Amino acid sequence: MTTQVNRSTQALREDLLAGRFDRSGKLREQALAEAQGVSRTVIRLALGELEKEGLVIREPNKGYRTRSFTLEEVTNAILVRGELEGMAARLCAECGLDETTIKQLRSLLIQFDTLLASGFEALEQRIAWIELNAQLHGAIIAASNNDILADTINSLSKIPLVSCRAIVFDMNDRSQNLIRLTGAQKDHRDVVAAIVARQGGRAEYLMREHARKSAENKRQGFVAMRQDKQSPALPGLALVEG
């Protein structure tokens, strides 16, 4: 069931980010279940996961519908999350990590490298990247041993496209997609290396920059879309209001 829910969640996530549903329209569980060939229970659980990310809204006695949001909401929240995760990285470096956490982070980096080498054509590969990203960011936040920090990041992550799970894959431009993800992986390696080396200031700066790049990529994609440039619009920005 878990794997089926993960597949359904990612398929719905990609449809939402591509703007394939009416922004204000109701998401009918039965129709979605039939389209995916799964049960309504699976769809209901998948929609629940997307509600946590802020991509859909559940209304009492009405079910789920898609949500629209502004570019400023997205980019500002990503930058704030970056500041907080930068603080988490600095705390990890200053306090030091235990060997178990270091081994976990290094194992995740190896798994990222394996995925980069195999590509992202299959849905399972994109799901795997999202899971790895969530695990790496989550491990750093947890290792900071600051519950208030973790709770605040979790609250911010409910804003659409801000969660570390809400990764957009541009399948219209696979080469650019690979370049972007390769850059993200370099950021991951640099942050982990700085933390392990007990370089608090560097770890904090690198994590903030990681978030800034994410925010800027979304902003540039939206500007290009509004200017009707030839390059394909960034997935996910179909839901952004001007």
Image (cartoon, helix red, strand yellow):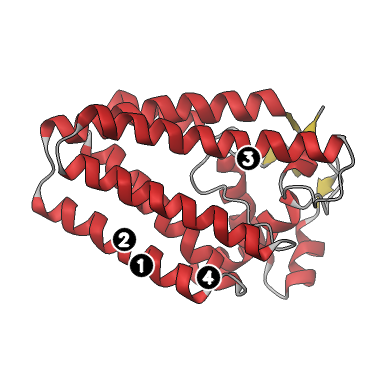
For marks 4 and 1, give the CA distance.
11 Å
Circle 2 residue: 108
Mark 4 and mark 1 lie on one chain; the one further toward the N terminus is 1
Q: What element carries label 1?
A: helix
- The answer to whether 177 is drawn above or below residue 207 in the figure is below
Q: Which of marks 2 and 4 is nearer the N terminus?
A: 2
User: Which residue in the structure is indicated by mark 1?
Assistant: 111
Task: Give me the C-alpha separation between circle 2 and circle 3.
Answer: 24 Å
Q: Which residue is drawn at 67% across and 23% down?
A: 72
Mark 1 residue type: Gln
Left or right of 188 on screen, residue 60? right
Q: Count neighbours of disc 3 (C-alpha within 10 A) and say few if under 14, some if 14 to 19, many if 20 or more.
A: some
Cα distance in 3D space between marks 2 and 4: 14 Å
Q: Which comes before the other along the chain, label 2 or label 3?
A: 2
Of the residues under marks 3 and 4, which one precedes in the sequence? 4
- Asked if the residue under mark 2 is in contact with the one under mark 1, i.e. CB atoms within 8 Å, the reply is yes
Q: Identity of the amino acid at label 2?
A: Leu
Is 237 placed left or right of 125 in the picture? right
The residue where tag 3 is placed is 217
Q: Do the residues labelled 1 and 3 touch (CB within 8 Å)?
A: no
Residue 147 visible (yes or no): yes
